[in-house]
Image: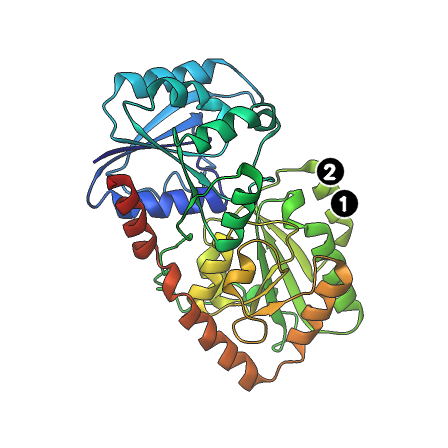
Amino acid sequence: MKILHIHTSMSGGGIEAIICALLNEVVERHDVTLATIFASKASDVFENKLDRRVKRLSLGKVKPGFSITEIFQIYRLIKTSSYDVVHIHGFFYYYAMSVLLLHRKVKFFYTIHSDAVMENSPWDKRFLWLKKWCFKKRLIKPITISPASKDSFTKLYGTDSMLICNGVSKPTITTTENPLGQYKITPSTKIFIHAGRINEAKNQIVLCQSFTKLIKNGYDAVLLIAGGNQDDSIMQQMQPFFCDRIIYLGERSDIPILFNFADAMCLPSIWEGLPVTLLEALAVGCIPICSPVGGIVNVIKHGYNGLLSDDSSKEQYYKRLKEYMRLSDEEIIKMKNNCKESFAPYDIKQTAAQYELVYGN
């Protein structure tokens, strides 16, 4: 098959991570092209992680915000090429004209990477009536990434979707040198990692508040925050919390390695789809401490392969941080092993096989 994926960019993030992993797997058997709407930048984390066999195109958009130019560029790209499958990721308004005019020529797929309501951009909301119609008429085939995401889709759009859970590659850790050793205050310091863009969904202010309370109550722990700054106002509110025990690392390309050497991962999100960082943590046995939102509840069983707070508030999240700090060494070892076992259904090879199956039907 000749397959085209289109996304805004390949900067660091969960959507970009799953696209990269999926393309790298599918290109083993098919002709795969990735088109990005925005011009590539040297800082795009997943641009350099793509397999060399993945063909790449860019529409060259530079300025953020709505522009009708890209709508016509995407239409021309699809119309003048002979793709069997066009797979798009969010921002439906970019593709609406192509779907309406070319759906008889090409199979269109659309992955909803988050809660169905929250994944809609402001411009998507203006075209929501058209988006609903295209899904119901199957001009474009929707794919959801977790049972919770699937339920939210059915509730919003009044129609069904295909369920293909996110997957990641199990990392091969070749280094034995701990890159997190420099952050330990004492030999017993527990290192927590939060990986995610600075934005409302990830709830980083509550994370900082909860962790500050943990530190003030005498627990020997350090929180490392890794992710690009997507919201300056949130970053400004976070900065007063930064200290020798709450450290912002910026955007990183080595998240699986950091998880491998960390004690636990933190994710107090307000909404989610099925976080790639959660799967990356499970793959290496890094214990997740999460809020009960989106597909997280389909993966984590409290006390077995992670800890789930009752909600996304700072009080409840602090409660789970404190619970982790009180676990015995034996309990931690058992939970880490359970994490690794829980990863099995989320290997990218299984995810890719399911996508290839629906592409061919």
Query: Which colour assignment does the render follow?
Result: rainbow
Task: Find residue 234 and report its image quarter.
Answer: top right
Give the camera-side residue of 124 and 248: 124
Q: Is residue 43 above or below residue 338?
A: above
Give the camera-side residue of 210 and 154: 154
Give the camera-side residue of 18 and 10: 18
Could you say where residue 127 lies in the image, as x and y percent from the top left? 56, 23
Q: Quadrant of the N terminus?
A: top left
Residue type, mark 1 in image: Gln
Marks 2/1: CA–CA distance = 6 Å
Specify few, some or many for label 1: CA neighbours under 10 Å numbering under 14, 14-19, or 20 or more: few
Q: What element carries label 2?
A: helix
Q: Is residue 91 above or below residue 205?
A: above
Specify few, some or many for label 2: CA neighbours under 10 Å numbering under 14, 14-19, or 20 or more: few
Task: Find residue 141 and report its image quarter.
Answer: top left
The answer to whether any part of residue 114 appears in the image is: no
Q: Is mark 1 on a helix, strand or loop?
A: helix
Could you say where residue 145 lies in the image, as x and y percent from the top left? 45, 49
**In this figure, which residue is indicated by the disc labeled 1?**
237
Q: In which quarter of the image is the C terminus?
A: top left
Question: Is residue 107 rendered to the left or right of residue 177?
Answer: left
Q: Is residue 304 above or below residue 201?
A: below
**In this figure, which residue is indicated by the disc labeled 2?**
233
Q: Are marks 2 and 1 in contact (CB under 8 Å)?
A: yes
